Amino acid sequence: MSTPPVSSGPGLSDREAALRLAAEGGNELPRAGRRTLLRIVVGVIREPMFALLLGAGVIYLFLGDLREGLLLFAFATISSAIAVIQENRSEKVLDALRDLTSPRALVIRSGTRKRIAGREVVRGDLLVLSEGDRVPADALLRSAHDLQIDESLITGESVPVRKLAGPAPAGNVRPGGDDLPVVFSGTMVVRGLGTAEVLATGARSEIGKIGAALIAIESEPTQLTLQTHHIVKVAAIAGIAVSSTFTLIDALVRGGWLNGLLGGIALTMAMLPEEFPLVLTVFTVMGAWRISRARVLTRRAATIETLGAATVLCTDKTGTLTQNRMSIVEMRAGKTVFKTEPAERPPAEIAGLIACGVLASAANPFDPMDKAFHQLDVDSGTRIAGMTLIKEYGLRPERLAVTQVWRATAGADAIVAAKGAPEAIADLCRLDAVQRAALHAGTAEMAEQGMRVLGIARAAWYGDALPDSPSGFEFRFLGLAGLADPLRPEVPEAVRQCRSAGVRVIMITGDHPATARAIARQAGLAADAVVIGPEIEKMDDRAVAARVRAADVFARILPEQKLRIVNALKANGEIVAMTGDGVNDGPSLKAAHIGIAMGGRGTDVAREAAGLVLLDDDFGSIVRAIRLGRRIYDNIRKAMAYILAVHIPIAGLSLLPLLLGLPLIFAPAHIAFLEMVIDPACSIAFEAETEESDVMRRPPRNPAARLFSRPLVVWSLLQGIVAFAVIGAIFLGALWRGMPENEARALTFVSLVFTNFVLIFVNRSFSASLRAAILRPNPALLGIVLAAGTVLATTLLWSPAKTLFEFGPLHWDDLSASFAAGIAVLGALELVKWGFGSNLSR
């Protein structure tokens, strides 16, 4: 390959470059501020339950009870570790941008070419650009030879753009469009050669501006997270107020301040439903694992909470709906029209058209259109071998066509092949008015279907001296080739399922409106009205919010406009999922409630900005992720209903002795044991519940709907009251019969554990029968029952555990009474659920 001419001098000296590097910084993006591990740990310790556990442990140590204190410290450590691991998952968006914007670069310094690290490129450097190079910085072209750049990572436009050397244009120059003299950081040279003077590096480049937008966008907590934290906060305030009051009363009546304080802490812990955040952690971690089996990687677990509520799916076109590769979909030679799908052997005139198109393409192509001709040549079996390229006439502004001259052997006649814009090929072939009209009609028909249309012509040359211009050949027009970025085959069915589930699909692309309309129609989207970027540019935010209510296709959209569309949808109350694969998608992926990146063809920036990544780029995986998201949310509500219900007997049994002046049933260790072992374990059983039959036939839940609806709260309270009444009666009856304090405590604890199991079965379904709830397969539930039963048996039979928990011995008749009480609770609650269970799923 020949080297590009240099028309702008020797470039910077090494000393000048070093001074600018020191003054302006490297050609990379600054890292966003990160939370240190110490700050995360401090934030976790400030949570109410963790503080209560640590406080109770300190009191026990002060009292000299080493075992009890260490046990509480162990519970606190386990809880803290889980939270710290979750909090320590930091964003890597800027790291990905740093890698993308720092490729190796070939520069000219002091008249000598040298290859340096991309981060060492400075303003004023002279870049040497060749096919296959990644542009390391925004730069002004000083020379260019047949230069074409793929800017799809920034603009979303799949077709490369032509670049010409020239003076710096006035005003702010944006990527996109042919014949601009500016190249942009992160883009790819697919054809030709050039030199360029660096204008902007690092954060000042176009990609740098996208990085700044990513820094400015704060990831929003999900509504589910906000609701649960609010409930925990309210319960904590109420619990502290109630427990403080009874601690003071108990201390004044009994005179034991430390014991009263421990009783108050136990009551606060009993009233604090701190399992809610922990259950969310369990569900999201397990949900991420389940979704990964559907070939979807979860980068931020909180995204799973929102999946089931998605009302709008904003999808990029290039690389998301389409395959991000140019393909020849149709060829026309005279009246013969050949479709490449389904694959068939082309007729003779089409085979000749294909062969000529290959001869007009680079032998080792970088250009996507050249690659498409070579691929079709291989697929159709019309490959021409043994030819030698002897001259190339590149693209020119006045002649938008490529002409190449080939010869089989020395002295043989040459074959001349040309392809390019149909108008340019018409000029080379000297077509008359009638022929031009027919050519224009065919071109318009193909363009309306979203194709990029090229004309192809052929000539022969019988001499050795070639003309200076392609117009010196006697070309014969052969036909037209229509290229398109093909639709992914799974997309139409995925769109249909989204519509069935009440999820609106919107396409947002930087491509041409005609192309966008054609792809939208193939995908099954409404494409009657296409909104273009210049329209969005003229609208204020209120007008954009009104426009996005009706339009489903947006074309010629710039990155900041894509972000405005996402924000407008959010302002309209929509829960927005956004798919994409390019650098230009980064801000909108992060701003959306659910960012979904394409993992195979997507850029690192898109993957790091997104909450979900489709590992196999299968658009249908989005539907499977939404299905799983709805199942997860349903099961979260079941688990939350259970936890709210089970806290009532725990709190009631902690409060009852304080009210009646009886021996305390639970110390902080008992409640910590229940909450850190039984409750989280049971939440795993709820997570494993299978989906409801109508999960994809109902609309998304109302984004404003609260997790705890009124029927759900009433149902939970009713469960808890019934359970407390039964267990409280067992405790009071045991004391009335003269049972020792430690035996009454053990009996009450066993009854509470049995009631836990009862509430699990009651809440497995809001509508299914008891028989279905018991027989529905759930290996996790079976494992939880066996594990909890084993732990319970250990605490009753193993002397060190009995001593630690202050349990006395139990007899078979005691256990039988506890079991019978659990069965009675189960029967009563099932009768109540049968009466108004249909209201619980709302």
Image: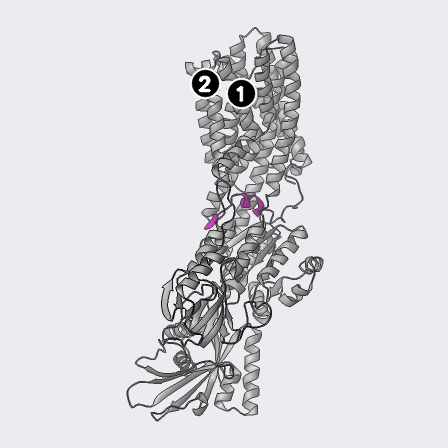
Does 608 lie within the magenta span?
no
| Identity of the residue furthest to the bottom in this view | 463
Task: Name the disc covering residue 192, or none.
Answer: none
Residue under the point 58% across and 20% down: 265
Q: Quadrant of the C terminus?
A: top right
Q: Residues within 10 Å of mark 2 (few under 14, many from 20)?
A: many
Identify the secondary structure beneath mark 2.
helix
Q: Taking 440 as reference, is 349 left or right?
A: left
Q: Is residue 739 left or right of residue 713?
A: left
Q: Nearer the viewer, mark 1 or mark 2?
A: 1
Q: As shown in the figure, which amino acid type bears the numbered disc 1? A: Ala
Q: Is residue 330 above or below residue 241?
A: below
Name the foreground residue: 54 vs 18: 18
Q: Crowding near pointer 1: few (<14 within 10 Å), some, many (20+)?
A: many
Inspect the magenta stretch and tell me whether residue 309 lies in it: yes
Q: Residue at x 49, y 30 (%)?
A: 79
Q: Is residue 521 visible?
A: yes
Tell me which corner region of the image, top left, top right, bottom left or bottom right, holds residue 705.
top right
Marks 1 & 2, CB-CB < 8 Å contact: no
Q: Which stretch is magenta?
A: 294-311
How much space separates mark 1 and mark 2, taking CA atoms?
A: 21 Å
Task: Residue under label 2, please give it.
Answer: 795
For the N terminus, which image quadrant?
bottom left
Does the rendering let one see residue 617?
A: no
- Give SS at disc 1: helix
* Image spot of residue 520 (x, y percent): 58, 65
In the rendered image, which quarter is residue 556 located in?
A: bottom right
The x, y position of residue 199, in whole percent, is 51, 66
Q: Earlier in the sequence, mark 1 or mark 2?
A: 1
Q: Which residue is mark 1?
A: 56
